[in-house]
Image (spheres, rainbow, N blue to C red):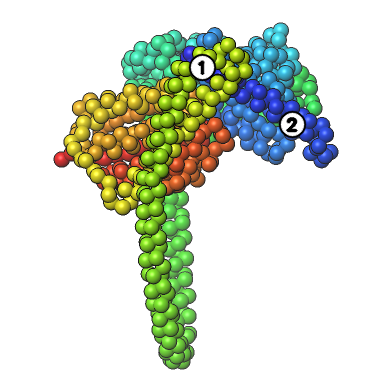
């Protein structure tokens, strides 16, 4: 939490001056250099989600908003934020979000803000003057139906989430007319509390017919114990359960899977993200449709309509949906369902399942019949065709002989060219090896004398410079220059070492001092050295190893070289979060080592080339602060791993981090 709260301030300090210069340049260009055809800025809309994209409800709302906005072309730019308040809802966390959004959007004018769910709507109402230039708000997914009556409900409209629990209970009674009790599962979230108030009102007419039992404020263990002992002629209504009494968080699918594993009675639901995962069905609310309606209202505001002039929409576009698999599990008949119900997972008939195959066979039979008739008709011309074919064959044989001779000659030429290329490659390796050796000795002398000069200068001359301000500045400049010489000399030394290693490997001159190595001890000894890559950053290095890892036969120095290359690469491209080094044993008896980071990631089109020699990942980034290496570290690592019959791969996604995985067979 400390790192999260300080990260925006570090970023602000780093880029504050550059951002101001960029804004002044854009403003002056728009004022003096832009033509009228490009002077009109595009509209900006912010989608502020209360939860994370991992929740299917939030994902469906986001999809609905994005598709609706995209239909308007490039005239509207959509920005999307996920507050993740299902997992984090402390005052410190909300204060951090305020600082983050102030940094990102203080200079951005939004024409409209779309919020999904109650926490986002409340946040936007509280901070829109401070963070979002008092932009109009269009909410959706809000269960608090009293929101329009609040004093701050100004310059705002939206879509109230209207679940229909009464219709779902009616469907349960149609399936089981003897239903006695309905257990209603709901969590203590802001949305959950609002939905309970609405459900209590809509289910009130059934109080004398069905016993309504509220399962709220329970842990997952307590909830599963209750669901495992339900008697006959009872049912469950799952409203929402993303956090239990003990603070444990669950996705919608995880929560339903826990309940489904112990519950022997039918489970009904209210939202489409539960369909197909174990609920019988009910009157289902769609998150995507909520997002589409909210986006349409936002576009009216963007086009000039006042938000307060647009009535709040009470969303009634719910549909009866049921899962055939669950219906069959409890012996419910499809005939008992309400009219116009949507039923998923209905088994296909033989014709529906094999329609393509049946028509393919029929078509093939018709085609074969036509071919037979055609063969009979053309039989009289077959003899003439055979003679023509013989002449064509003789002509083709002549062409084949000529072409074969040409290909043979071309093959000889390619063999000669390949021979020359191999000679050039050997010459290149020899030159690199010689140049690298010749450079190492004078470079070592340069670095040695540089350190001696730096030591003597600090000892004898710097104390004398304090009395004269001009000499003190010059002395500081000399110290900075000496530091740069040492830093760049060290980088050049590493580059020469990489060249030497690569040339030795390619020429077969490298020594492989293979011994039996304990991976756990090796990583334990290497950890302090690897942590040095992160000494001046906020990034954390975590080393995780399984107990009793089996030994491997390898050169420990070469394995440390691979680890240094992978950890150094991760440190170069990771600005916050952590880098994790994990060592495990696979089921096939291989040592598996994974280096994962939370860095900038690698574009998909770059992954096929990162292990190529002299390929620099920094070429694909726009961050000029990343020091480019020799482009040989990953290539050398690949050669070392493959020397021990292992494999090395990479997985990555832009802005989400990267993982480098290598495996080596264990000893014996």
Mark 1–mark 2 CB contact (< 8 Å): no
Residue on which disc 1 sits: 462
Q: Total label count? A: 2
Name the secondary structure under disc 1.
helix
Residue 543 seen anywhere in this rendered image of the structure: no
Residue lying at the far left in this picture: please name it.
Answer: 668
123 lies left or right of 514: right
| Quadrant in which residue 558 is drawn | top left
The quarter of the image holding the C terminus is top left
Q: Which mark is residue 174?
A: none
In the figure, residue 519 lies in which quadrant? Answer: top left
- Where is residue 259 drawn, in percent x and y? 38, 21
Q: Residue at x 30, y 46 (%)?
A: 642
Q: Nearer the viewer, residue 244 or 532?
A: 532
Q: Is residue 620 visible?
A: yes
| Front one among 290 and 622 | 622
The location of residue 499, given as percent across then percent down, is: 39, 45
Q: At which x and y percent is residue 185?
A: 45, 16
Q: Secondary structure at mark 2?
A: helix
- Residue 427 rendering spot, x and y as whole percentages: 38, 57
Residue at x 49%, y 38% (from the top left corner): 628
Indicate which label's residue lies in the foreground, 1 or 2: 1
**Mark 2 packing: few (<14 Cα in 10 Å), some, or many (20+)?**
few
The residue drawn where x is 36% and y is 27% is 530
Badge 1 or badge 2: first in the primary sequence = 2
Circle 1 packing at 10 Å, graded few (<14), some (14-19), many (20+), is: some
Q: Does 351 appear above or below 246?
A: below
Give me the residue at 46% from left, 56% from top.
356
> Taking 193 as reference, is 594 left or right?
left
The residue at which mark 2 appears reads as 26
Asked if residue 191 lies left or right of residue 611, the reply is right
For the residues labelled 1 and 2, the Cα–Cα distance comes to 45 Å
């Amino acid at each position: 939490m400390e790192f999260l709260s300080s990260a925006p301030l570090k970023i602000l300090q780093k880029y504050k001056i550059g951002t101001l210069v960029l804004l002044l340049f854009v403003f002056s260009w728009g004022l003096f250099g832009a033509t009228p055809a490009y002077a009109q800025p595009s509209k900006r809309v912010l989608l502020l989600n209360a939860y994370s994209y991992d929740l299917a409800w939030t994902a469906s709302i986001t999809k609905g908003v994005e598709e609706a906005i995209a239909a308007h072309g490039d005239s509207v730019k959509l920005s999307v934020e996920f507050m993740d308040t299902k997992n984090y809802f402390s005052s410190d966390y909300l204060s951090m979000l305020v600082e983050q959004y102030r940094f990102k959007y203080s200079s951005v004018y939004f024409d409209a803000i779309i919020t999904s769910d109650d926490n986002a709507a409340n946040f936007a109402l509280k901070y829109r003057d401070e963070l979002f230039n008092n932009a109009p708000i269009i909410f959706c997914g809000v269960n608090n139906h009293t929101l329009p009556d609040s004093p701050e409900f100004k310059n705002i409209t939206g879509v109230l989430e209207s679940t229909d629990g009464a219709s779902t209970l009616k469907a349960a009674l149609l399936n089981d007319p003897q239903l006695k009790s309905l257990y209603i599962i709901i969590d203590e979230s802001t949305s959950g509390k609002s939905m309970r108030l609405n459900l209590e009102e809509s289910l009130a007419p059934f109080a004398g017919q069905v016993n309504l039992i509220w399962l709220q404020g329970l842990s997952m263990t307590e909830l599963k114990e209750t669901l495992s002992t339900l008697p006959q002629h009872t049912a469950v209504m799952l409203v929402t359960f993303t956090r239990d009494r003990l603070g444990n968080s669950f996705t919608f699918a995880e929560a339903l899977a826990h309940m489904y594993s112990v519950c022997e009675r039918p489970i009904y639901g209210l939202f489409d993200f539960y369909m197909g995962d174990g609920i019988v069905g009910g009157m289902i609310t769609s998150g995507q449709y909520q997002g589409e309606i909210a986006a349409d209202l936002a576009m009216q505001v963007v086009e000039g309509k006042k938000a307060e002039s647009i009535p709040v929409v009470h969303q009634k576009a719910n549909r009866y949906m049921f899962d055939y698999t669950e219906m069959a599990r409890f012996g419910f008949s499809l005939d008992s369902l309400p009219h116009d119900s949507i039923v998923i997972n209905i088994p296909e008939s033989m014709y529906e399942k094999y329609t393509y195959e049946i028509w393919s066979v029929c078509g093939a039979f018709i085609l074969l019949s036509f071919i037979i008739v055609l063969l009979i008709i053309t039989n009289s011309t077959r003899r003439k065709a055979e003679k023509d074919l013989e002449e064509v064959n003789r002509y083709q044989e002549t062409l084949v002989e000529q072409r074969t001779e040409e290909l043979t000659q071309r093959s000889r030429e390619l063999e000669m060219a390949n021979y020359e290329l191999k000679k050039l490659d050997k010459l290149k390796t020899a030159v690199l090896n010689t140049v690298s050796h010749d450079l190492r000795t004078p470079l070592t002398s340069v670095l040695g004398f540089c350190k001696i000069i730096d030591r003597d200068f600090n000892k004898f001359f710097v104390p004398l410079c304090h009395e004269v301000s001009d000499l003190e500045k010059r002395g500081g400049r000399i110290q900075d220059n000496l530091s740069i010489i040492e830093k760049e000399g060290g980088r050049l030394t590493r580059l020469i070492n990489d060249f030497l290693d690569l040339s030795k490997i390619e020429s077969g001159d490298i020594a492989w001092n293979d011994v039996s190595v304990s991976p756990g001890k090796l990583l334990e000894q290497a950890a302090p050295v690897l942590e040095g890559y992160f000494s001046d950053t906020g990034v954390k290095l975590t080393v995780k190893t399984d107990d009793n890892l089996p030994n491997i036969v390898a050169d420990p120095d070469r394995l440390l070289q691979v680890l240094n290359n992978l950890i150094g690469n991760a440190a170069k491209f990771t600005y916050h979060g952590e880098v994790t080094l994990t060592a495990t044993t696979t089921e096939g008896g291989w040592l598996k080592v994974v280096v994962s980071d939370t860095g900038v990631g690698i574009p998909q089109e770059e992954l096929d080339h990162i292990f190529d020699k002299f390929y620099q990942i920094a070429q694909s980034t726009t961050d000029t602060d990343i020091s480019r290496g020799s482009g040989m570290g990953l290539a050398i690592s690949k050669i070392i791993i493959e020397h021990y019959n292992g494999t090395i791969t990479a997985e990555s996604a832009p802005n989400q981090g990267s993982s480098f995985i290598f495996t080596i067979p264990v000893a014996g």
